[in-house]
Image (tube, grey):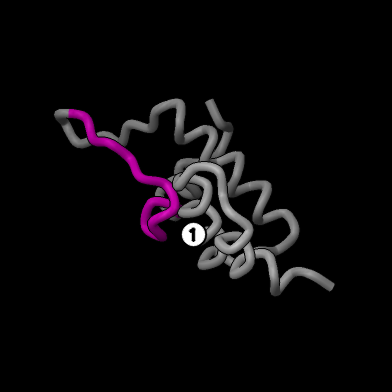
Amino acid sequence: MSGAPATTLRSYEREGLLPADRTAVGYRDYGPPAVDRLALIGTAKHPGLPLAEIRQLLQVWEGGPPSAARQVPVAAPRRQ
């Protein structure tokens, strides 16, 4: 659905960016929320955010509407 290579999905899973459920026989199962996460990861990677900062961004994203105080640690280093 996302068009991302399996190697990319596994890498993001190892990095803690993309959790996957497992089927009864051990196959990874990515649901529709994974496609949204992949889109956010791709958008964040485009300007060059490192994976550690993308992980922080995902935590903010999952926490609901971010407050300004929660955005500052991720956004502040990019302002120039």
Foreground residue, 73 or 14? 73
Report which quarter residue 48 is drawn in: bottom right
**The furthest residue to the left:** 24
- Position in image of residue 71 (x %, y %): 61, 60
Q: Name the residue beneath numbered marker 1.
A: 55
Q: Dot 1: within a 10 Å radius of its alpha carbon, few (fewer than 14), some, or many (20 or more) residues?
A: some
| 1 w.r.t. 37: above or below | above
Report which quarter residue 51 is drawn in: bottom right
The residue at 55%/56% (across/down) is: 57
Q: Is residue 13 toward the left or the right of residue 49 in the image?
A: left
- Position in image of residue 27 (x %, y %): 26, 34
**Amino acid under disc 1:** Arg
**The furthest residue to the right:** 80
The residue at 52%/33% (across/down) is: 35
- Position in image of residue 18 (x %, y %): 42, 47
- Position in image of residue 14 (x %, y %): 37, 57
The residue at 55%/59% (across/down) is: 54
The residue at 39%/28% (across/down) is: 31
The boundaries of the magenta stretch are: 12-23
Foreground residue, 67 or 5? 67
Question: Per the image, is 53 magenta?
Answer: no
Circle 1 SS class? helix
Question: Per the image, is 21 magenta?
Answer: yes
| 46 w.r.t. 75: above or below | above
Foreground residue, 80 or 14? 80
Q: Is residue 47 toward the left or the right of residue 74 in the image?
A: right
| 58 w.r.t. 25: above or below | below
- Quadrant of the frame with the C terminus: bottom right
Q: Is residue 46 toward the left or the right of residue 80 in the image?
A: left
